[in-house]
Amino acid sequence: FKMLIVYISIFSVFIGILSIYWGTLYRRDTRYKNMGFLVVSEDLPFEVDGSRLDPFLNDAFLSMIQNNETVINLAKWEQITLSEFQESARAHNNNITAEVYRKVHHQKYWAAVHIKPNASQLIYRSLATANFSLTASGEITELIDVVYESGRQYSALSQYVSKHISQIEDVWLSSYVSQMIYEPIIKSLNDTQRLALLANNNTISILASKPAFNIIDLRPSPSSAVLGPSELGLIYALLFSFHQFNFSLEIYNYIRTKLKFRHYLVWRFVASQINCLVLALVYSLITIAFQVPTNVAFGHSGFVVLWMFMYLYISASGGINENVVTVILAFDQKVFLAPWMIFNIVINISSTFAPFVLMPGFYRYGFALPMYNTYEALKVVFFDTWKGNLGRNLGVLVIWIVVMNIVLVFNVQWANNRARRIATEKKEAEKEK
């Protein structure tokens, strides 16, 4: 019967805790439409022999994002008119291209599509004059820029943004370029111009070449090993923050007998912070040992910045662990140590390693957790992503450290009083016997 209770307890704990993580994946494909993609087009109508022609490429792309269900379901498309975007660019002293980059870098959008000036006119001229220079120079593949930053969410970008861009490009090339750009242009040509397109292999190549996407990654990975310290390493650091207290417990108990309670609290705080500093230093040294660049955003100071960010993370996580473990040990329930660690890891990683826009709103609790805020800070170190949220990220970590150490003072005092009371009651019970 006891064995059955144990199995039921383990089953209940694991299904309850792991459901938190699996919940982040629930119907994720229905939330792709929450990822904002910007569309800016400088492709305008043009004149040929006094006749006004429509911007074929611009119209084809807009038709795709407005009418194709596959493309619609892969992103939240937002088209900004050229005049409106020009105002925004002037306000920030940018040209159109620089303003597109700024919007993506400042995390206003997950990706941006920039259709270059005179794109349709260039294609028309190439076909009308049978001039294959547009194809030979590769300029045909530079008419549509697609801009994003891998560093914004390194592992998620490859699973979602870049993967979706590839799917959108497949739809674009297979269903829209020929039907809505090349065919209308060729129909508008005279017989002589059409025959010229079939004159030789060079001119035929014009018809075979299509305006594919020119992918621009503003913040690519500086090293293939960056996934370790920037993401997975945070899980290990969380475990270190638990064990730095666990391994020091006997020392704490010994020192407690040698110092006054007030002095003991000061000593414990200092010892704990030194432990966190050392662990953070080890983490940073391992990062350097595997040649992961830390100078991307802060130059030669990058190593020290990484060390301090990891110190804040380990200290904040360690403070949470110390308080919880103190309560668990006060009630002499060591059996709950493992479930607590699993729970702590799961609630942190669930809200950290995927974009909030792809998860149910419940997981926005991650904004207040140490791992998410450290993850955001480390992206600045390793990828030089936007620093606009860095103050908030560090502020959350500092708040956790301050609050947890204040709570720990009362927690330790309560645990000591409880231990004394239990010891006294035990002695009295033995006397009565």
Image: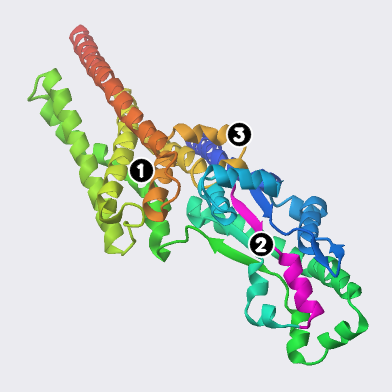
Of pointers 1 and 3, the one earlier in the residue sequence:
1
Q: Which residue lies furthest to the top in this view?
A: 432
Q: Which residue lies furthest to the front in this view?
A: 50
Q: Quadrant of residue 184?
A: bottom right
Residue 390 drawn at (x, y percent) = 40, 40
Residue 101 drawn at (x, y percent) = 54, 53
320 up-or-down from 132: above or below:
above
Q: Quadrant of the C terminus?
A: top left
Callouts 1 and 2 close, C-beta under 8 Å: no
Assign a secondary structure to mark 3.
helix
Between circles 3 and 2, the one closer to the viewer is 2
Assign a secondary structure to mark 2.
loop
Amino acid type indicated by mark 1: Leu
The residue where tag 2 is placed is 116
Between circles 1 and 2, the one closer to the viewer is 2
Assign a secondary structure to mark 1.
helix
The residue where tag 3 is placed is 361
Nearer to the camera, 132 or 339: 132
**Number of other residues with Cα within 10 Å of mark 3, as a class: few under 14, some 14 to 19, many 20 or more:** few
Nearer to the camera, 119 or 161: 119
Amino acid type indicated by mark 3: Gly
